[in-house]
Amino acid sequence: MKRIFAWGALVFGILYFALPLIGMTNFSMKMRRGEYSFDAYAKVLGDPRFQETFSYSVMMALFTIVFGVLLVVPTAYWVRLKLPALRPYVEFVTLLPLVIPAIVIVFGYIRLYNTSSWLPLTGSAFGTDLLLMFGYAILALPYMYRAVDTGLRTIDIGTLTEAAQSLGAGWFTILSRIILPNVLVAVLSGAFLTFAIVIGEFTMAALLNRPAFGPYMQLLGANRAYEPAALAVISFGITWGCLGLIQLVSRYQKGAPPKA
């Protein structure tokens, strides 16, 4: 009976997620009346605005991931190694982006960093991009920190640190050549979640008036019929491609001993 219930739950879950995707894919291929075609995909991929916004969001995602790794990995490592009593407070701070809406954060940015403030970041494209990257990093902070902290929990960072220091390694060497390789899978998981957040984020990019992928998807969905479905299928494929890469890295590192 338990096995039947488990298989029933699995089948229900697969159908719940698969049927909308099948229906959306089917609809996206009906742009040419009476037959299936990839016309909608060709129009989306050939649209200069798609290429511009997608490349911009990918670039912002990469910068956000690098910034997030440089911020979170040393912080989580130091808190777990030297300041374990502060862990609940740090975790509370990292959870704040889940309860503070993105629109509140971006309006605070605009208020603090407009052209008449002490630091007019919104007065230039570079400053606005920098502000947007910080906003993305904040939105991804709960997921990146949880992923890295979980990875650190699986290794004995105290022993690894003492062994490295006994061999004369400095803090930068410890972080870059010992800690980071051992939590690489966790970092990649956080990086994937950050990438997904940046690609689909709408509020911050729209209010800061940046040419990101999220506002483009919203604009396309408001004015077209078949192209938004094709765009959603493409986004889904990119997401699953990233998941596949993470699984490959996880299998490659599975069972490998900690590096010291």
Image (cartoon, rainbow, N blue to C red):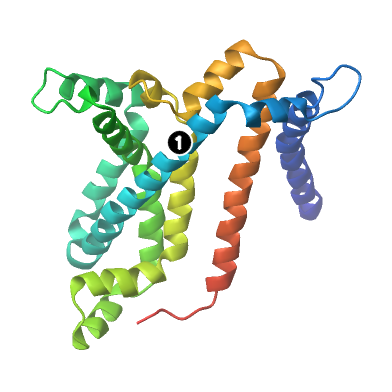
Q: Nearer the viewer, residue 79 or 9?
A: 79
Name the residue at 26% across, 85% down.
Answer: 163
Name the residue at 39% across, 70% down.
Answer: 181
Quadrant position of residue 131: top left
Name the residue at 36% across, 44% down.
Answer: 64
- Residue 238 vertical placement versus 78 (above, below): above
Residue lying farthest to the top in this orientation: 223
Judge whether residue 31 can be spotted in this image.
yes
Q: Nearer the viewer, residue 231 or 143?
A: 231
Residue lying farthest to the left in this orientation: 118
Residue lying farthest to the right in this orientation: 34
Label 1 sits on a secondary structure element that is: helix
Q: Nearer the viewer, residue 86 or 185?
A: 185
As drawn, is 249 to the left or to the right of 152?
right
- Residue 241 vertical placement versus 203 (above, below): below
Judge whether residue 154 can be spotted in this image.
no
Q: Circle 1: is it few (<14), some (14-19), or many (20+) Cα within 10 Å?
A: many
- Residue 96 vertical placement versus 189 (above, below): above
- Looking at the rendered image, the quarter that the C terminus falls into is bottom left
Q: Which residue is mark 1?
A: 57
Task: Give amino acid for label 1.
Answer: Ser
As drawn, is 55 to the left or to the right of 152?
right
Q: Position of residue 93 (x, y in %)?
A: 25, 42
Q: Nearer the viewer, residue 160 or 134?
A: 134
